[in-house]
Image (cartoon, helix red, strand yellow):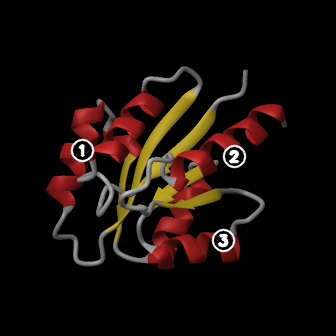
Amino acid sequence: MRTINISFNPLDTWKRGDFRDFIKKVNDTDNINLYIIAYDASSEFTDYIDSVGSILGLDNTRILTQTTINGVVADVVSNSIDVHFDANNLVITEINDNLTDVCNPILVRYAPDSFADPTYITDFDRILEDLLDA
């Protein structure tokens, strides 16, 4: 079975319980390599990003922090990321514009008061099925 490389930016996503639970389940899934690829322009959240990686048991080679969006895109390419989750629309747009054949970016947003799964989960399920069928 194919190994799927998945990354996410914990800034503005990890604080949400549903996203934390989702990422923890993804991390515990066989044939998935999880990465943190974070856009932190000011480098002020490095400790926070590292602590999220520690909670997930990720080694330092899978915790990547960039101060530019182009740096995030470069990390996505160099680590052969199949799916990237981010709450930053600029990062999602940059990946969409430059890496459509390489990576599937998913914007993490919420629909409060909705009983349906968040759109990032339904988007991921669809993409994962396509990746596994390929």
Give the CA separation, mark 3 to mark 2.
14 Å
Sequence-wise, which precedes: disc 1 or disc 2?
1
Q: Is residue 2 above or below residue 41?
A: above
Q: Name the one closer to the observer, 43 or 121.
A: 121
The residue at which mark 3 appears reads as 96
* Lateral position of residue 125 relative to residue 112, left or right: right
Q: Position of residue 9 (x, y in %)?
A: 38, 57
**Kind of residue at disc 3:** Asn
Asked whether residue 81 appears in the rendered view, the answer is no
Marks 1 and 2 close (CB-CB < 8 Å): no
CA separation in Å, label 1 and label 2:
25 Å
> Which residue appears at 30% of the width and 77% of the height?
41
| Residue at image point 41% right, 38% down | 22
Q: Amino acid at mark 1?
A: Val
Alpha-carbon span between mark 3 and mark 1? 26 Å
Closer to the chain start, of discs 3 and 1, is: 1
What amino acid type should be assigned to the residue bearing mark 2?
A: Ile
Taking depth in this image into account, of 121 and 25 the one nearest to the observer is 121
Kindly report which numbered mark, 3 or 2, lies closer to the viewer in this rendering: 2
Depth check, mark 1 against mark 2: the one in front is: 2
Q: What residue is at 56 percent from the left and 57 percent from the top?
A: 76
Q: Residue 133 vs residue 12: left or right? A: right
- Give x and y (percent) for residue 83: 59, 50
Give the labeled residue for mark 1: 52
The residue under the point 66% across, 56% down is: 103
Which residue position is annotated with label 2? 127
Outermost residue to the right: 134
